[in-house]
Amino acid sequence: MTHSTHSSETVRIELADRSYDIVIGENLLGQASSYLALPKASAALIVSNTTIAPLYEAALKQALTGHYKTIHSVHLPDGEAHKDWVTLNLIFNTLLGRGCDRKTVLFALGGGVVGDMTGFAAASFMRGVPFVQVPTTLLAQVDSSVGGKTAINHPMGKNMVGAFYQPQRVLCDLTVLQTLPPRELSAGLAEIIKYGPIADMAFFDWIEANIEALKACDAKALAYAVKRSCEIKAHVVGQDERESGLRAILNLGHTFGHAIEAGLGYGEWLHGEAVGCGMVMAAHLSKEMGLIEGHFVKRLTTLIECAGLPVRGPVLDAKDNASKYLALMAHDKKSVAGDIRFVLIEGPGKARVSAAPEAVVRDVIDRCCA
């Protein structure tokens, strides 16, 4: 469900008493009106990182001054490598050190790492305080900030320690995307592309037709891509908040992708790069399982490459690469009783989750890695 005002559009996530809006538009971050009707509190905490804070924290603080008596802030080190207990504790240290209470509202100002950690801190501090997502990367706007998944990484697996905890609002300011490095923009395109094969082939056709505009940060193209991605995710999350079934299709490419991230060391490849490559591997697996034709694998691979993403997997172990991937994937949250679960494309626009024969998976890994 989407409705518009002159400057922004709203996509609603319907979760009964935990429902909230994703607001999408230009120049929203610095407007006081963007933060109306949030839970009342005397204090707010802005959680950002060392890269984003110098760019946008002052504008956010200014916009929040009318709403809160005191506004604290904490700057986390930037990058997936810091998505851990040590960094999470910086948020708790600030909250406790400043005497924050259970009404304090947290604002996540940054990409997926900041959003995931702020959400997890909000879920845990005093057993739950409200938080707001202000995502500053394309990937966070179309995926990680939406739907209430919060977590930190563990050396043995990505996002292994966390909670389902919904924000009060998600504010997608498209203007901030203009400062994104090309590599970060491409990483976000991976999570946009994924919505096509799993849910909406008309959207996939549109992405193919508009990929150059998206890469050039064209405001109109980005606005549509963010809105449509959020609509699809909202629809899926509304039906299956805790990923007991349908929501798992949003993980297309993630089983392979998480193995790449953990195997190379977090932050070596961006999450979106690993997912882009993982989607190519998942497409090959879907073809081997007799679900899709080779020409669709080629079409998807071409689009992912066009988006500036890697399409060959890294070699994680020179001696036995496939075994290394399998060992890492067995640790994934989506494995059930030791069975690795893959999101397979059942036909363009439709996905399902299932196990796959190990020999076939090994073959795909060998074929898809550099």
Image (spheres, helix red, strand yellow):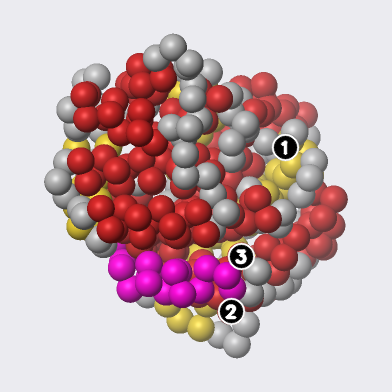
Judged from this view, the residue extending furthest toward the left is 290
Residue bearing mark 2:
220
Whether residue 242 can be seen here: no
Task: Left or right? Give the position of 235 relative to 44.
Answer: left
Start and end of the magenta stretch?
Answer: 198-213
Query: Which residue type does callout 2 highlight?
Result: Lys
Report, in whole angstroms, how far the alpha carbon at label 1 lies from the one at label 2. 29 Å
Up-down: is 327 above or below 289? Answer: above
Which one is in front in this view, the residue at disc 1 or the one at disc 3?
A: 3
Q: Are marks 1 and 3 in contact (CB under 8 Å)?
A: no
Residue bearing mark 1:
78
Q: Position of residue 241 (x, y in %)?
A: 33, 48
Q: Residues within 10 Å of mark 3 (few under 14, many from 20)?
A: some
- In primary-sequence order, the first of circles 1 and 2 is 1
Up-down: is 117 above or below 52? Answer: above
Q: Residues within 10 Å of mark 2 (few under 14, many from 20)?
A: few
Query: Which residue type does callout 3 highlight?
Result: Lys
- In primary-sequence order, the first of circles 2 and 3 is 3
- In primary-sequence order, the first of circles 1 and 3 is 1
Query: Which residue type does callout 1 highlight?
Result: Asp
Residue sitting at 52 percent across and 68 percent down? 211
